[in-house]
Image (cartoon, coloured by chain):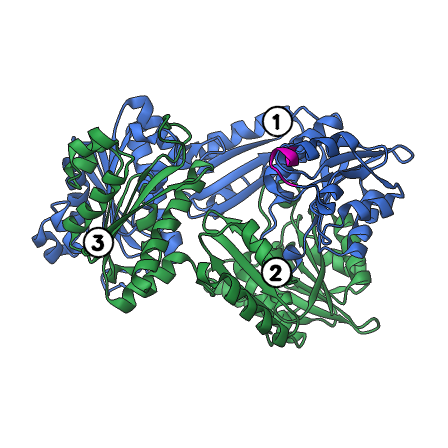
Chain colours: A blue, B green
Amino acid sequence: MKVFILITGSEFVNGLKLEKNSLFIAREAFERGLEVNGIGIVGDDMYQIQYFIKMALDKSDILIVSGGLGGTQDDLTREAIQEAIGVHLIYDREWLESIKKTLKDQGRALTDEIKKMARLPYGSKRIENPVGKAVGFVKILDDVNKAVVAVPGVPSEMKPMVKKAFEMLGFKEKLKRSHIFRTFGIQELEIDEMLKDIDGVILNSSPKGVDIFVTDREAFFLKNKVDVIRERVGDYVYTEEDIEMEEVVGRLLKEKGLTVSTAESSTGGLIVSRLVNIPGSSSYVMAGIVSYSNEAKINILGVSKESIKKFGAVSDQVAREMAEGVRRLTGTDISVSDTGIAGPTGATEDKPLGLHYIGYCDGEKTEVHRIVYKGERNDVRLYVSQYALNLIRINIGR
Amino acid sequence: MKVFILITGSEFVNGLKLEKNSLFIAREAFERGLEVNGIGIVGDDMYQIQYFIKMALDKSDILIVSGGLGGTQDDLTREAIQEAIGVHLIYDREWLESIKKTLKDQGRALTDEIKKMARLPYGSKRIENPVGKAVGFVKILDDVNKAVVAVPGVPSEMKPMVKKAFEMLGFKEKLKRSHIFRTFGIQELEIDEMLKDIDGVILNSSPKGVDIFVTDREAFFLKNKVDVIRERVGDYVYTEEDIEMEEVVGRLLKEKGLTVSTAESSTGGLIVSRLVNIPGSSSYVMAGIVSYSNEAKINILGVSKESIKKFGAVSDQVAREMAEGVRRLTGTDISVSDTGIAGPTGATEDKPLGLHYIGYCDGEKTEVHRIVYKGERNDVRLYVSQYALNLIRINIGR
């Protein structure tokens, strides 16, 4: 079964907004074993929308349109579908009544604009909107055995309605068609070289590491591929779930009953902020000190003035004293620290742009890693925060 | 002039990767006064790519294809264009020589895969790749007066090459076709109501506020619209540039010669991390204390145990003592603080989910704002950080 996804919205073709709905819809289709054979994005233009609808119905079995179901004059999807498939629009009486009731409870009147949102092509099945007023629909074209689905563009409405539409079309069940490995500490090129004999592998690099997606239409082949990949790159994998490093680390801290604190300079609070991202983190994150100035390093963390003078603020020794200082100050089980030059300025002859010292301390030992990461300021900081979190993972996960 | 953008890559139609290149290309076209009449995204499938190329050349004057110019068997763009427009591929001798030279310098051999990347349709003009080996091209179809442009999918290669292609096609000059207002403290619905008589307005909401894009093909009309919008919503605008709140605040702090520190609980370091995002922030950001636990609030910031006992950690009084405490500890000119319940748990009968107290202190006065923001945990934290930064802006910008 082939699916075509059509997104409407002038903001997308004018380059004013990043279009993200197609990713969600494509993923949902893919996970149900359906093949998306194209995605189209068009402005709020009746001619273009109709053109794409006809083209999509010619090429595909299921057309999913997202956007243009509101009540303004820019919302053209219903009329475009009406024209393209030659079926007139009617009011969904039940839905209209429920809208009226909601409005009445809110003390608001039914306007023509709102009323428009209760229309759907004759003979289609309603997809209830759990959030807003625009009704969605599934219309089966019996003569050609194809289906048109329309859902709003607002993500919180679109997402449950797309799932519902697939269910209505008989594709409720998700298949295991892909697997993710999230790695850190290895380059994309190296992984590419290690896995080049395996097809259906997609690599996605960022300062957080390289994500490996592996896909196969058959569960049996997928499992084989997963086993091979795990054997080859397993040492670098921090999770095989679609979760972030901070969640991996958070689970470990909780499981081991350990508390953590951070002393950050270059990352400016990014490490602690990422740890706090995770619900329930108040049980293991105690505090973070962002000692951006030398005075803060000395006065709050107790880094020695002499160390800064002798080695510089960006040094192995200062990273060490920061990690030890914050652990002492907060009384946590473990702590991490960083000091470095994120750029674009601040480099010297001995200390290149991107140089960072990252410290880890658990009372028994303190270790400091020296790294150099070249890149845009915020990419550097993201990488350093990932490195520090990974350092916790490696140390306490043993 | 109509432009069609075609993106190739199976990772996009399978929902495994967010497609972002079309946004950049669409924006570049829009800013040059060109109309993008559609965007297509297809997998690495010869038939689909050809179908879209033909369709696009039928509907548009300029087709820009991104992706599929590498040397692997998934890279089909060159062959697809060859078939679709009926022009054979040749080697760009000069480009091939430069590749050979680079490889020689690196001590690598020329493989067939790399060699493929030097091919382009007969009669086309080369677009040099400033980063990688795949050559791009502009091919004018003289008989129909249309153009096909092909560039790689790697963003660092694609971006300069797209700009170059527009230049080669005679669209170097950018027009002033859009203007941005970034607002905070007003709802999207309110703005929509205030600006509903102005066309070409696009609103984009997030926890950081509502961005207003206003567009017009004519500079004169654009200026008129901008003036009207500024008069109506100007009070809520924190910038009319495409920059973040932390940059606005950073510029103000620098201009006024003020230093800042933060005492964060709910935001977990997000405020200070955002401030540190800005290059040069080390001249005004001194330190941030993430006092996530009560002990940290008491021991590091000097919040009184009695206040926490009497009012709770999430209270006006504690936010006040946090702001004053961090200012005292770090000796900065101003400070901000927050304490709240980001969720999903932690709410009580008196203290609903999303309740936050945000403090500001400058030595002369301390003010605390009480807000309730409902939403997903990280959206709440983003909103609170934006609120705190805006509080600095309002206070020191006066």
Q: Magenta part of the protein: which range?
A: A102-108
Q: Which residue in the structure is indicated by mark 3?
A: B365
Q: For the residues carrying marks 3 and 2, which lies nearer the camera in this image?
A: 3
Q: Return the x and y of residue A344 as percentages of the image width and height.
A: 34, 63
Q: In the rendered image, which quarter is residue A324 located in? A: top left
Same chain for labels 1 and 2? Say yes or no: no
Where the C terminus of chain A falls, by quadrant? Answer: top left
Q: Return the x and y of residue B346 as percentages of the image width and height.
A: 36, 28
Task: Tell me the SS state at disc 1.
Answer: loop
Q: For the residues carrying marks 1 and 2, which lies nearer the camera in this image?
A: 2
Task: Tell me the SS state at disc 3.
Answer: loop
Q: CA distance from mark 3 to mark 2?
A: 40 Å
What's the residue at 64%, 66% (across, down)?
B30
Q: Which residue in the structure is indicated by mark 2?
A: B201
Confirm or deny contact between disc 3 and disc 2 (CB under 8 A): no
Q: Is residue A82 magenta?
A: no
